[in-house]
Image (tube, rainbow, N blue to C red):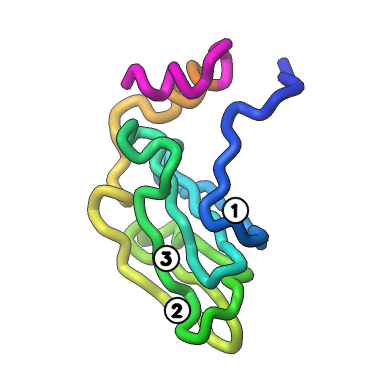
Amino acid sequence: MLKKQPLLVLQPSGRPLFGVQWSPQRAALFAAAAGDGGVYFYDLCQPQALLSPALRLDASAAGAPARALAFNARLPEVFAAAAGDAVRVWRLPELLRTPGLSEASLLRRVADADDPVGELRRR
């Protein structure tokens, strides 16, 4: 059932966001491309990093907005982002590319919870 309120509201940089993408390998990991040139990764399985990014990558050497991002569906360690006139490709750390046990069930519990943030913190 659709809830009127979002489950989470995250504001990584205070600048406009130009894209968000869920990882195809990790049900609880997503990245957001921001106007400050950063790409912010959120891992909902890491309660200590729940409301702050687990990782920030600089997609632009000149501070241009990060406007596109892509996880590699075949190679989970490879990630790309575009900013300005360049595409940068990174190798993600092991923590962000290896699925945890029952990530999908965690997201289902969060979606059904009256207190989604509280449900994530109980992990």
Residue 97 is situated, as x and y percent measured from the top left of the image, at: 32, 51
Tags 3 and 2 touching, CB below 8 Å: no
Q: Badge 1 is on which residue?
A: 20
The residue depicted at 60 percent of the width and 53 percent of the height is 20
Q: Residues within 10 Å of mark 1 (few under 14, many from 20)?
A: some
Residue 18 is situated, as x and y percent measured from the top left of the image, at: 66, 62
Quarter occupied by residue 64:
bottom right
Residue type beneath disc 1? Val
**Separation of residues labelled 2 and 1 (CA atoms):** 17 Å
Judge by depth and name the residue closer to the eye, 73 or 19: 19
Does label 1 or label 3 sit earlier along the sequence? 1
The answer to whether residue 121 is left or right of residue 64 is: left
Q: Main secondary structure of the magenta part?
A: helix
Does label 2 or label 1 sit earlier along the sequence? 1
Q: Does dot 2 land on a helix, a strand or a loop?
A: strand
Q: Residues within 10 Å of mark 2 (few under 14, many from 20)?
A: some
Q: From the viewer's perspective, is the residue at label 1 or at label 3 nearer?
A: 1
Q: Badge 2 is on which residue?
A: 88
**Separation of residues labelled 3 and 2 (CA atoms):** 8 Å
User: Which span of residues is magenta-colored?
Assistant: 111-123
Q: Badge 3 is on which residue?
A: 79
Q: Does dot 3 land on a helix, a strand or a loop?
A: strand
Residue type beneath disc 3? Phe
